[in-house]
């Protein structure tokens, strides 16, 4: 038994999945999910998944949640070739979330360029650190 999302009716496996679905969908820019949470769980962005789950399950309809595993069915009709497209969909959703976070952060272009420069420096430092760690003798890194 699971829960139907009160906004889009997507079935969720349990209370925690429902809470995460609502919050992540809202954070990724879905105005309907965000508006529902603002109305029914105003502190949704400040509580943990368990607390949000307790609130939203009181308002969600219980529904059957079919769990089918590939090893339990002989023939299934979904397309394994599409799995790459699912990752593309997630990447687009993540980018929309980042764009929304930038919009809400009140950062200007100069701030964004500073952050991007810091990200690039971090990437370079991580690359150099991993190369340095391989070449470095552990005895040389001890300090007194």
Image (cartoon, rainbow, N blue to C red):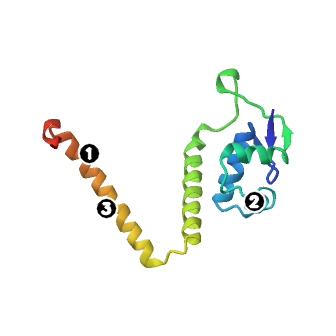
Q: CA distance from mark 3 to mark 2?
A: 38 Å
| Residue drawn at 82 percent across, 51 percent down | 6
**Mark carried by residue 130:** 1
Asked which quadrant contains residue 65, the reply is: top right
| Residue drawn at 38 percent across, 61 percent down | 119
| Residue drawn at 14 percent across, 38 percent down | 137
Image x and y of residue 143, in percent:
16, 43
* Apparent side of residue 8 relative to residue 103 in the rendered image (left or right): right
**Mark carried by residue 121:** 3
- Check disc 2: other Cα within 10 Å, few if <14, some if 14-19, many if 20+: few
Q: Secondary structure at mark 1?
A: helix
Q: CA distance from mark 1 to mark 3?
A: 14 Å
Upstream in the sequence, badge 1 or badge 2? 2
Image x and y of residue 77, in percent:
70, 34
Give the residue number, with chain letter if any, for mark 2: 42
Q: CA distance from mark 1 to mark 2?
A: 44 Å
In depth, the one of 83 and 20 nearer the eye is 20
Q: Secondary structure at mark 3?
A: helix
Asked which quadrant contains residue 26, the reply is: bottom right
């Amino acid at each position: 038994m699971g829960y139907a999302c009160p906004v889009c009716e997507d079935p969720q496996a349990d209370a925690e999945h429902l809470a995460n679905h609502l919050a992540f969908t809202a954070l990724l820019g879905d105005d309907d999910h965000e508006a529902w949470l603002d109305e029914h769980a105003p502190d949704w962005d400040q509580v943990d998944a368990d607390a949000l789950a307790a609130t939203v399950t009181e308002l969600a309809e219980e529904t059957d949640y079919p769990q089918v595993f590939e090893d339990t069915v002989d023939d299934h009709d979904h397309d394994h070739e599409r799995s790459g497209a699912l990752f593309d969909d997630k990447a687009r959703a993540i980018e929309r979330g980042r764009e929304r976070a930038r919009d809400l952060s009140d950062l200007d272009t100069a701030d964004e360029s500073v952050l991007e420069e810091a990200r690039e420096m971090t990437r370079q430092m991580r690359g150099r650190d991993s190369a340095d760690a391989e070449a470095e003798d552990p005895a040389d890194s001890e300090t007194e």
